[in-house]
Image (cartoon, rainbow, N blue to C red):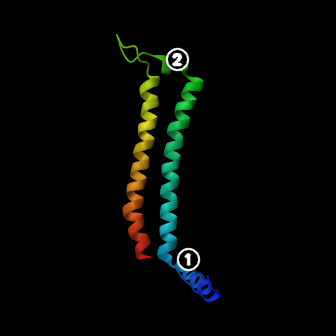
């Protein structure tokens, strides 16, 4: 890259960073990412805390005649929940976020 190209790229970058739409977009995307990450962490750490502090609850059988305890469907539920919130994030990122990015 030549010095002239670098200067042009730096100018474009500075104009994008100064755009109020860009600042709003970055803030919205960061908040959304943080919310989704917190939801995933709550699910995983909540399950781990149940394993650590309430084994009796997780060991309860689902019902009469069942051999499966509550821990199995809750563990699967944590995995399914994180897959769903990841899918929701990717879907929004590939539609709304990409559209806003293209406008900027």
In the image, is residue 49 above or below residue 33?
A: above
In the picture as drawn, the residue positioned furthest to the bottom comes out as 4
Q: Which residue is mark 2?
A: 56
Which image quarter: residue 10? Answer: bottom right
At which x and y percent is residue 52? 60, 25
At which x and y percent is residue 76? 43, 31
Neighbour tally class for label 2: few under 14, some 14-19, many 20 plus, Cα within 10 Å: few
What's the residue at 52%, 65% (across, down)? 27
What's the residue at 48%, 50% (across, down)? 36
Q: Give the quarter of the figure containing the C terminus.
A: bottom left
In the image, is residue 92 above or below residue 56?
A: below
In the picture as drawn, the residue positioned furthest to the front comes out as 1
In the picture as drawn, the residue positioned furthest to the top comes out as 65
Q: Give the quarter of the figure containing the N terminus.
A: bottom right
At which x and y percent is residue 34? 53, 53
* Disc 1 secondary structure class: helix
User: Looking at the image, do the residues carrying marks 1 and 2 touch, with CB atoms under 8 Å apart?
Assistant: no
């Amino acid at each position: 890259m030549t010095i002239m190209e670098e200067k042009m790229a730096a100018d474009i970058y500075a104009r994008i960073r100064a755009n109020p739409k860009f600042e709003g977009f970055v803030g919205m995307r960061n908040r959304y990412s943080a919310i989704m990450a917190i939801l995933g962490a709550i699910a995983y750490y909540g399950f781990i805390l149940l394993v650590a502090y309430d084994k009796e609850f997780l060991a309860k059988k689902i019902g009469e005649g069942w051999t499966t305890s509550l821990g199995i469907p809750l563990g699967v539920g944590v995995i399914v929940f994180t897959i769903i919130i990841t899918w929701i994030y990717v879907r929004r990122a590939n539609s709304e976020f990409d559209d806003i990015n293209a406008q900027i």
